[in-house]
Image (spheres, rainbow, N blue to C red):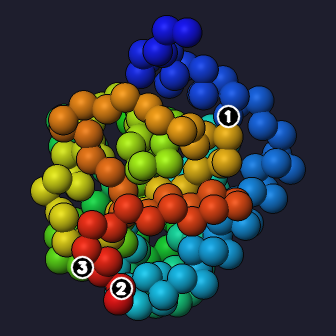
Amino acid sequence: MMEQTKAELRKQYKQKRRALTPEQVTVASAQIRKQFLNSDEYKDCNHLLIYVSQDNEVDTVEIIKQALTDDKVVAVPKVYGDHMHFHRIHEMSDLKVGAYGILEPAGCEMLHPTEGILIVPGIVFDINGHRIGYGGGYYDRYMKLHPELTAVAFAYDYQVLPEISCESFDERPDQLLTPSEIYSFMENNKYD
């Protein structure tokens, strides 16, 4: 069997995600949310840099609401050309529909945190932490610039393959949470 290209995998797994029922999304998201919110990494962090889920992605909105309730500094990404910056939000109403129909911060202060958790999106992952994102490279560049942040990805179980090919510029998250597994890829376990 020929190896699928990133573009083919991206298309195939976006279609699979679109086919999920609202109930499947809700149940899986609740399992992942529970794992994440109960983790020491979350409890110990002050800053949470997190995207707003869309198109049947694992739901992040409830995590954002809980983090705000927990008095975490919550920041959401906004794209500027080839770069992405995170802006602090204080409530969900700080988000407005922006580029590509994605909710993004409007008129909020830009953050440059030196610690915290970065939630990384992805379409396909493998058991070694490699990921295929949306193709813009924004998160690869951000993770490379901010190695001090703990990068965590959320995925449905079907999104995790035994192996996917990767490029030298591809960055791996430190952890990947699915409804049934917690994969850790931390070179130097930051939480010993």
Q: Earlier in the sequence, mark 3 or mark 2?
A: 3
Amino acid at the residue labelled 2: Tyr
Q: Is residue 21 left or right of residue 106?
A: right
Residue shown at 44% from the left, 65% from the top: 184
The earlier-in-sequence mark between 2 and 1 is 1
Residue at the far front: name it: 1
Q: What element carries label 2?
A: loop
Closer mark to the observer between disc 3 and disc 2: 2
User: Judging from the image, what secondary structure is the residue with disc 1 in?
Assistant: helix
Is residue 11 depicted above or below 165 in this figure? above
Q: In the image, which disc is placed on residue 17?
A: 1
Task: State the separation of the CA atoms marked 2 and 1.
Answer: 32 Å
Does residue 37 lie above or below 87 as drawn?
A: below
The location of residue 138, given as percent across then percent down, is 27, 42
Residue 186, label in figure: none
* Residue 3 located left or right of residue 25: left
Q: Earlier in the sequence, mark 3 or mark 1?
A: 1
Q: Residue at x 19, y 72 (%)?
A: 148
The answer to which of 101 and 73 lies nearer the viewer is 73
Left/right placement of residue 117 relative to residue 187 reads right
Could you say which disc has been placed on residue 191 in the image? 2
Q: Which mark is residue 115?
A: 3
Residue 87 visible? The answer is no
Confirm or deny contact between disc 3 and disc 1 (CB under 8 A): no
Quarter of the rendering occupied by the N terminus: top right
Q: Quadrant of residue 170?
A: top left
Q: Which amino acid does label 3 sit on?
A: Glu
Rendering coords of residue 39 (x, y %): 54, 82
Q: Residue 11: in sight, yes or no?
A: yes
Q: Residue at x 66, y 48 (%)?
A: 156
